[in-house]
Image: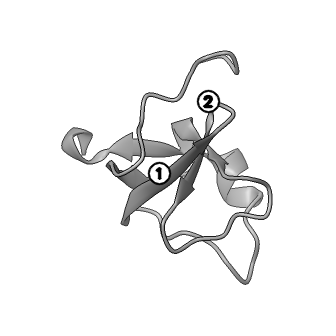
Amino acid sequence: MTMSEVCPYRPGQTVIYRPSTKGWDCRLPDQHLEPGKEYVVREIVSDVYVVVEGYNSVGGGLFWSEFIPVDKR
């Protein structure tokens, strides 16, 4: 995967948070997503960052590869 890849998800789609080691290490201690939990995509930022419902990401979302679609558990 390269940074130039466009996010395959769309607003309204349900995804599962599967953080990489780097992604897990970059989380905010007081506000983070739960690995393995389903979330609904609220917005895609700059074609690569996912913002999910119920989570206000300070940095404008998490990189899309930190998630998998629900149908690919």
Q: Nearer the viewer, residue 70 or 21?
A: 70
Q: Residue furthest bottom?
A: 30
From the top left corner, tell me how far across and down residue 50 is, in percent: 57, 47
Quadrant hosting residue 63 = top right
Mark 2 element type = loop
| Lateral position of residue 68 relative to residue 24, left or right | left
- The type of residue carrying mark 1 is Arg
- Side (left or right) of 41 relative to 57: left
- The residue sitting at 70% across, 64% down in the picture is 57
Instruction: Say which residue appears at 51% left-offset and 74% top-offset.
Output: 54
Q: In the rendered image of this protein, does residue 25 appear above or below residue 62?
A: below
Dot 1 crowding, Cα within 10 Å, few <14, some 14–19, many 20+: some
**Whether residue 36 is situated above or below residue 8 in the rendered picture:** below
Dividing the picture into quadrants, the one containing residue 10 is top left
Q: Quadrant of the N terminus?
A: top right
Q: Residue 30 has which mark?
A: none
Please state the total of marks drawn on the protein image: 2
**Relative to residue 55, is residue 41 depicted above or below?**
above
The quarter in which the C terminus is drawn is top left
Q: Which residue is labeled 1 in the image?
A: 18
Q: Nearer the viewer, mark 1 or mark 2?
A: 2
Query: Which residue in the structure is indicated by mark 2?
Result: 47
Earlier sequence position, callout 1 versus callout 2: 1
Q: How is the image coloured?
A: one colour
Q: Give the Cα separation between the discs numbered 1 and 2.
A: 19 Å
The amino acid beneath tag 2 is Asp
Label 1 secondary element: loop
Query: Measured from the top left, where is residue 46 in percent x and y?
Result: 69, 33
Q: Nearer the viewer, residue 42 or 18?
A: 42
For residue 13, side relative to residue 65 (left or right): left
